[in-house]
Image (cartoon, rainbow, N blue to C red):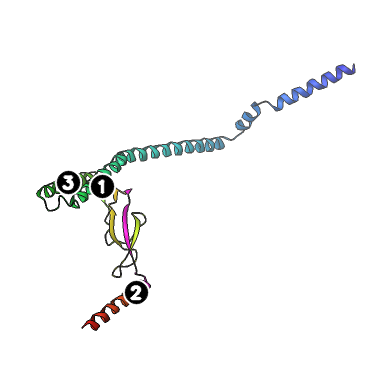
Amino acid sequence: MEKDESQISDSDNLEGVEENKDPSKSSEKKEDLKPEEKIIELEDRLARAYAEIENQRRRFEKEKDDAFDYGGFSLAKETLNLIDNLERSRFALENDEKLKNSETLKKTVDHLNIIQKDMISILKKNNIEEIKSIDKKLDPNLHQAMMEVEDDNKEPGTIVQEIQKGFMMKDRLLRPSLVAVSKKPNKKDENLKLNEKSEENQSKSNEN
């Protein structure tokens, strides 16, 4: 008889556990919510779903606009290499001793200039503009300083030489301008130059 009683108690315990695990209890809690509370919960879910849809729509619109405005960004960047090569070719021809002052050189340089102007014009039509650099203050967002040049007539950090042209595509940097900026002359160098000049003047006066 004792065994029978233990079996009965065990079965009662199992039924209790099963009742605790019954998922219907959680749904019962929701059913216990008042109609006003259910409405508030549904409105919150709807607001969250709407916000997520709106965020996705905005992301899609931005991606679409970027694709339309900057879809040719990589191609434009590669095109700049052609302009650089034209400038290098013109520079090499103009400094060729064998061709200097020849009619052939003049005609070739003129043709290269026309091609370069046409290419820059095509870039402008596609919202790609040169960055103005000379006599401007160095802007790290637009310029990359490659060297410093002593210049007592310019404020330090002023661009005095353009090594490579920079370009913007609308409001995006296509590539920075490579530039040389001014700096104040070294005092030691100035004193050395003054001493050299004074020595020259003394030697000239002694000769006279």
For marks 3 and 2, give the one nearer the viewer.
2
Residue 112 numbered mark, or none: 3
Estimate the spatial distance between the alpha carbons at disc 2 and disc 1, rounded to whole Å. Answer: 40 Å
Left/right placement of residue 115 relative to residue 81 reads: left
User: Disc 2 designates what residue?
Assistant: 192
Kindly tell me whether residue 167 is visible in this rendering: yes
Residue reaching furthest right?
1
Residue 77 spot, x, y in % from top left = 30, 43
Image quarter (top left, top right, bottom left or bottom right) of the C terminus: bottom left
Segment colored magenta = 174-189
Estimate the spatial distance between the alpha carbons at disc 3 and disc 2, rounded to whole Å. Answer: 45 Å
Bin the neighbour count of mark 2 within 10 Å (Cα to Cα): few under 14, some 14-19, many 20 and up.
few
Q: Amino acid at mark 1?
A: Asp
Kindly tell me whether residue 127 is visible in this rendering: no
Q: Tell me, yes or no, whether the highlighted magenta stretch contains residue 182.
A: yes
User: Disc 1 designates what residue?
Assistant: 84
Please tell me whether residue 136 is drawn above or below residue 7 in the rendered image.
Answer: below
**Circle 2 sits in a helix, a strand or a loop, which is it?**
helix
